[in-house]
Image (cartoon, rainbow, N blue to C red):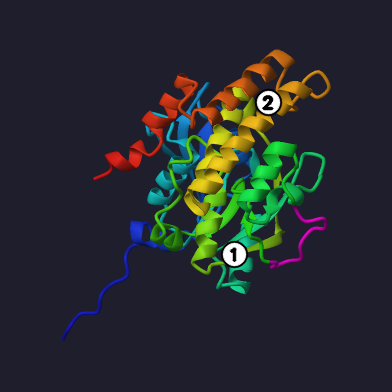
Amino acid sequence: MTSQPQPPPEDSPQVAHESQLITGIVVHWHNERQLAELLDSWPQDPRFKLVVVNNGSTETLPEGEYRRIEPGRNLGFAGGVNAGIEAARSPYVLLLNPDARPLPGALDQLLEGMATHPEAAGLAPRLTGAQGEHQYRWQLRPLPSWWRLMAETLFMMPPPGPVDEPVRGARVEQPAAAALLLKRDLLNAIGGLDEGFYPAWFEDVDLAKRLAGLGHTLRYWPAAHFHHDLGATVPRLGYGGFLWTYQRNQHRYVAKHHGPLPAALLRLATFLGMVARLLLLPLRQPRRASNRKVAVQGLLGAAVGALSGWRWPVRLASTIAQTAGRRRREAP
């Protein structure tokens, strides 16, 4: 008589993987305090695992129930997320900034949302600030056209977001990746995040654009509620580094999805926009710059970057060229 196969022990890797439903992927870069707060808020539930990719630490990382990945260098946000996806075994992954924390029941609500919308590629939860202020105008945006990006650069227009909070299950074109639930198999199928958007910015816009191009939808699920502090990385990177990188990655996005002519026009608009901001400095100091001297240096750097096709300043350009995509080139 043929013996029946026995189920694996409860503590076996197979059972552990089957019990995991969501893996939170946190790309950490000198955010030890925020990471500790996130670990405190993460539910102690075997269905919900946490993976922390350590791109750089100033202090010892906090203790906690999570898997830690040490790549030995800064992979950037996209590279860190891809490393986390490789380590995950759950059907869903939750991209999560260190300064975003789930409120009680938020992860269960995400599972409920996916059960309600199984066709969706993922869900964006509700984000609120420390005082309860809503962030949907910043968080939930339409995919940008190249001419809209030109207008933002030239005239300092804020990106458009919804005037009122969308209803539960509403389709969202481009939710921010500060907290975003996605199907792991789908991410693997499309090659994960594009690591060329190094170290950060526009990799989530690129992801949303690729998903939309394949006919996939992303939806809003406000019943899943997260607190988000906003902007934990920018102060450490510095205004000049942020501005140059943001504008460079914006140009890369337009070149990738809209072609060389719109990209060339955007570069020109970026140069003119930086010059206009320099002229307006006596009247208007950029919010992210600590003082006007820092603002002048940052704006000049971005103007030179746009004019040179992001080959200057050499220090910034060489860092991007040496690091962006290196992890994938090294992969077998």
> Does 323 lie within the magenta span?
no
| Apparent side of residue 312 relative to residue 294 in the rendered image (left or right) | left
Q: Of the numbered discs in the image, which one, if any, rests on residue 292?
A: none
Residue matched to label 1? 111
Query: Does the image show residue 81?
Result: yes
Please name whichever residue, 3 or 320, is drawn nearer the observer in this view of the structure. 320
The residue at 37%/29% (across/down) is: 322
Q: Amino acid at mark 2?
A: Val
The residue at 62%/21% (across/down) is: 300
The residue at 81%/24% (across/down) is: 284
**Measured from the top left, where is residue 88 in percent x and y?**
42, 52
Local secondary structure at mark 1: helix
The residue at 54%/29% (across/down) is: 307
Near mark 2 (Cα within 10 A), the count class, few <14, some 14-19 or many ≥20, is some
| Apparent side of residue 169 relative to residue 98 in the rendered image (left or right) | right
Q: Are marks 2 and 1 in contact (CB under 8 Å)?
A: no
**Measured from the top left, where is residue 24 in percent x and y?**
53, 49
Query: Does the image show residue 103?
Result: no
**Measured from the top left, where is residue 111 in percent x and y?**
59, 64
**Measured from the top left, where is residue 125 in percent x and y?**
67, 56
User: In this picture, which residue range is highlighted in magenta?
Assistant: 161-170
Q: Amino acid at mark 1?
A: Leu
> Does 163 lie within the magenta span?
yes
Quarter of the image with the N terminus is bottom left
Quarter of the image with the C terminus is top left
| Apparent side of residue 109 relative to residue 90 in the rendered image (left or right) | right
Residue that protrudes farthest toward the bottom in the picture = 1
Image height check: is 139 above or below 6?
above
Residue matched to label 2? 275
Residue that protrudes farthest toward the top in the picture = 293
Image height check: is 221 above or below 84?
below
